[in-house]
Image: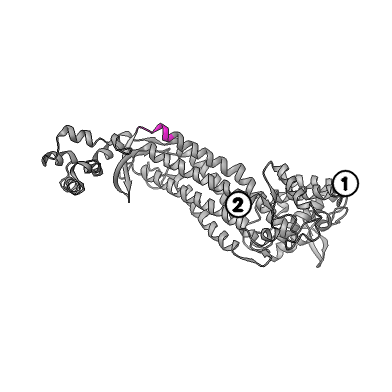
């Protein structure tokens, strides 16, 4: 590989000759060769959008000449379009403020712009990475702004649509199965009956509640730190810049971004990220419960519950011919486990704001964006390849419903709790039906039993 000599405030360093990044990026590559996880590309795109907005605001405020602003805006647009992804090689595990990633953006944007003007890479003229691309900014306010913008975009454009679609699927199935009566279960033991529609409708309600909490959590993420610069005071930032740049970002994204009312808090804490992660953690818990219920109901076909059929998507075993597994349920529950783990990391990282700056920003946004991405993808996959395919196994549902000993609960108002308990135990021990035992003890007539022990009459209050 051929190299060029680039210079920054620490002196000269060799940089790959054709690289659009510069010396500070190269230093980070050398100093933080930790793991394989690079800064998420959706964070990079959000950061490039922020650089555009900053250039527009600085131009509007008379700080940046129009021709230079336009060069920055055009260069950043190429990054947003994904044309230079390989120019962002930095690892998540770097400085806790994300300074190297900010400078990575600044260097690449400057070099793209200068190259268009016929200048050599690393010339830093006419566009300088710090003086122009980073104008009115610090990493300390631009990185958390990029965190919020990236998270909000991904939530609105990917997570919420996936969540909505899965919720709609369960609502549709709930209506479709509204008249299918089945055995209920509590403590994994037989319980009084309900409909398959009522059971699945509960899943739709769970997911709807999760959406409410996620939308509520967005309010904190819409607040942007830009304008706080280094410690929240706004040093080197013109008056009105914070509101102007936030309005530009809002217009570019068509999302409700505003400037943070307290820049000190915006830099020193990431409570909005912690809150959103908590909402995602709750969604993960809901997905875990729902997926586990479905794979248990589909278990079998001979040794399980086998109350529902789900799609048979691929062979399930390399040794057992004909075996098919509930793989979509397994994938969703694994994702849920990872999101719960991400939330632990985010919670710890968000608690570590020391004085004027939280220096765990990269690990916070890496895990937050990962949770958003894998939940979005997993819910979409689960919806298409599992939830939409659910069909009732009518024969098995009727068999289990009619064998349930907890139908005796409906007799309690007529024969008392103690007598009903004796009937259930005797039926279980002697392998008899409830009706057989009730009639043997002359507790009521067959017609009375059929009237009072009808599962369809146990689906709502008396």
Residue 442 lies within the magenta run: no
Which residue is more in the foreground, 338 or 347? 347
- Give SS at disc 1: helix
Question: Which residue is pictured at 44% across the width and 35% down the height?
Answer: 389
Locate the N terminus by quadrant: bottom right
Which residue is tagged 1? Answer: 67
Horizontal placement of 350 versus 294: left or right?
A: right
Report, in whole angstroms, how far the alpha carbon at label 1 lies from the one at label 2.
35 Å
Which residue is more in the foreground, 281 or 297? 281
Which comes sooner in the sequence, label 1 or label 2?
1
Which residue is tagged 2? Answer: 369
x, y (%) of residue 41? Answer: 67, 50
x, y (%) of residue 314? Answer: 45, 41
Question: Which residue is pictured at 81% across the width and 58% down the height?
Answer: 130
Horizontal placement of 364 versus 243: left or right?
A: left
Magenta residues, start to end: 173-179
Which residue is more in the foreground, 456 or 338? 456
x, y (%) of residue 450? Answer: 20, 34
Locate the C terminus by quadrant: top left
Q: Residue 232 lies in what quarter of the image?
A: bottom right
Residue 366 appears anywhere in the view: no
Mark identifier at residue 265: none
Horizontal placement of 368 versus 286: left or right?
A: right
């Amino acid at each position: 590989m051929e190299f060029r000599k680039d210079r920054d405030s620490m002196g000269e360093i060799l940089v790959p000759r054709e690289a659009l990044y510069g010396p500070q990026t190269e230093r980070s590559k050398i100093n933080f060769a930790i793991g394989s996880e690079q800064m998420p590309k959706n964070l990079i795109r959000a950061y490039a959008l922020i650089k555009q907005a900053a250039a527009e605001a600085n131009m509007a405020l008379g700080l940046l000449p129009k021709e230079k602003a336009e060069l920055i805006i055009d260069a950043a647009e190429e990054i947003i379009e994904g044309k230079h992804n390989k120019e962002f090689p930095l690892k998540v595990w770097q400085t806790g403020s994300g300074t190297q990633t900010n400078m990575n953006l600044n260097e690449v944007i400057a070099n793209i712009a200068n190259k268009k003007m016929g200048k050599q890479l690393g010339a830093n003229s006419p566009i300088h990475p710090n003086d122009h691309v980073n104008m009115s900014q610090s990493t300390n306010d631009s990185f958390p702004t990029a965190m919020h913008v990236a998270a909000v975009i991904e939530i609105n454009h990917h997570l919420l649509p996936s969540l909505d679609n899965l919720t709609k699927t369960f609502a549709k199935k709930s209506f479709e199965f509204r008249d299918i009566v089945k055995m209920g279960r509590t403590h994994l033991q037989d319980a009084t009956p309900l409909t398959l529609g009522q059971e699945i409708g509960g899943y739709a309600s769970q997911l709807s509640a999760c959406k409410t909490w996620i939308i509520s959590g967005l309010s904190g993420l819409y607040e942007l730190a830009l304008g706080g610069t280094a410690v929240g005071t706004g040093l080197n930032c013109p008056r009105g810049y914070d509101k102007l740049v936030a309005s530009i970002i809002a217009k570019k994204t068509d999302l409700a971004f505003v400037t943070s009312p307290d820049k000190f808090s915006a830099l020193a804490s990431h409570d909005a990220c912690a809150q959103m992660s908590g909402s995602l953690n709750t969604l993960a818990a809901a997905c875990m419960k729902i997926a586990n219920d479905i794979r248990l109901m589909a278990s079998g076909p001979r040794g399980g519950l086998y109350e529902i059929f789900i799609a048979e998507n691929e062979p399930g075993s390399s040794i057992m011919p004909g075996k098919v597994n509930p793989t979509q349920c397994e994938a969703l529950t694994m994702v849920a486990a990872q999101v719960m783990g991400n939330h632990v990391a985010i919670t710890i990282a968000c608690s570590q704001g020391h004085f004027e700056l939280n220096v765990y920003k990269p690990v916070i946004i890496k895990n937050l964006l990962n949770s958003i991405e894998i939940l979005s993808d997993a819910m979409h996959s689960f919806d298409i390849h599992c939830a939409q395919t659910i069909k009732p196994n009518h024969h098995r549902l009727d068999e289990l419903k009619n064998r349930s000993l907890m139908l005796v609960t409906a007799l309690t108002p007529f024969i008392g709790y103690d007598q009903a308990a004796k009937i259930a135990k005797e039926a279980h021990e002697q392998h008899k039906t409830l009706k057989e035992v009730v009639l043997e003890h002359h507790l009521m007539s067959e017609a009375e039993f059929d009237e009072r022990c009808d599962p369809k009459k146990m689906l709502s209050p008396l």
